[in-house]
Amino acid sequence: MSNPIEEHAPEVAAALAAVGAARTALDIDLDDPRVENFADQFGVDVSVIDDDLRRRFLEATGPTAFEVAQTIYVDDYWPRIAIVSGEVLGGTWGGGELGEPTELWPLIEEFMRQVARLDTLDPVLTELVRLRGARQHECRLCRSRRSVAALEAGADEATFEAVDAYADSDLPPAYKAALGLTDAMIWTPYLVPDQVVEDAQAHLAPEQVVEVVLDVARNAANKIAVALGADAATVTDGVELFSTDADGNLTVVPPEPR
């Protein structure tokens, strides 16, 4: 059976496999109840991780907290990629083989860069998918940012605000289908609603479905920062603009002098 990720985003599939292989090689104990409780809430709704749950997690993990949080992110989102893309497009994806122990974060960063290079979605839709995830996860930093490419493509703040009630908005059907798929990735990955599948199949090309699924997974790396309480916005007024270069690197755009 075909693998939709390999078929439509082969470079991302290679990056996914590398992360999966590195994850399987890591000898990290996730059985401590303090870590289990943290991981469970990370997967269900990261926005409600409170100071007490975070404190207990940090007590259990100490200097390895960031590495453990990365592992939880991979365990949380790699299955979602396979299941949701399979529900819409069919096919399977098994993740990575057993690899050699190596640092996980650089491989996650490479995965994020490869996803950012995908371009079958227009810049406005890419930004709406990102913002929908940012608002569902309550990432303060991500909520405070706006894409220069989306603004240049005609989006404004009213466009961005439409993500909060997209089903009742005047956004195009393809946008609504993509945002429905975004919600399924975040909230119901193991039971994707039939209507979400039907809308995605009707309004999105297969490569666009893959890109939405991968965009949501990439953006969900913000759950690590939210979970650790490291997601504070860097602006206190207005928004911070960012651009993404051809290699998939994100750059904050300095404000113009007043």
Image (cartoon, rainbow, N blue to C red):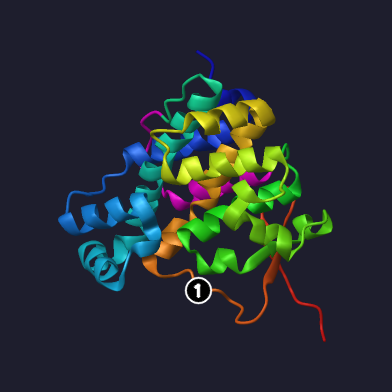
**Quarter residue 38 falls in:** bottom left
* Whether residue 141 is visible: yes
Relative to residue 190, is residue 182 depicted above or below? below
Q: Residue furthest front?
A: 168
Identify whether 229 is placed above or below 26: below
Give the residue drawn at x 76%, y 61%: 148
Report x, y in % for residue 30: 23, 49
Residue at point 16%, 55% (across, down): 33
Between 162 and 89, which is closer to the camera in this rendering?
Answer: 162
Horizontal side of 185 relative to 132 (left or right) equals: left
Which residue lies under the disc numbered 1? 232
Q: Nearer the viewer, residue 117 or 43?
A: 43
For the magenta stretch, what is the residue range? 97-118
Q: Is residue 204 visible?
A: no
**Residue 140's x, y, as percent?**
52, 69
Q: Residues within 10 Å of mark 1 (few under 14, many from 20)?
A: some
Taking the magenta stretch, the answer to whether it contains residue 169 is no
Residue in the picture at 66% in, 33% down: 208
Looking at the image, residue 205 lies above or below residue 221? above
Q: Considering the numbered disc 1 on the image, is that residue within a helix, a strand or a loop?
A: loop
Q: Nearer the viewer, residue 45 or 111?
A: 45
Quadrant that contains the C terminus: bottom right
**Residue drawn at 53 percent across, 60 percent down:** 135
Observer-nearest of 191 and 38: 191
Toward which corner of the image does residue 188 lie, by quadrant? top left
- Image label count: 1
Does the segment drawn in magenta span residue 107? yes
Give, as a three-letter code, the residue at label 1.
Ala
Pick out the residue farthest to the top. 1
Image x and y of residue 195, in percent: 53, 31
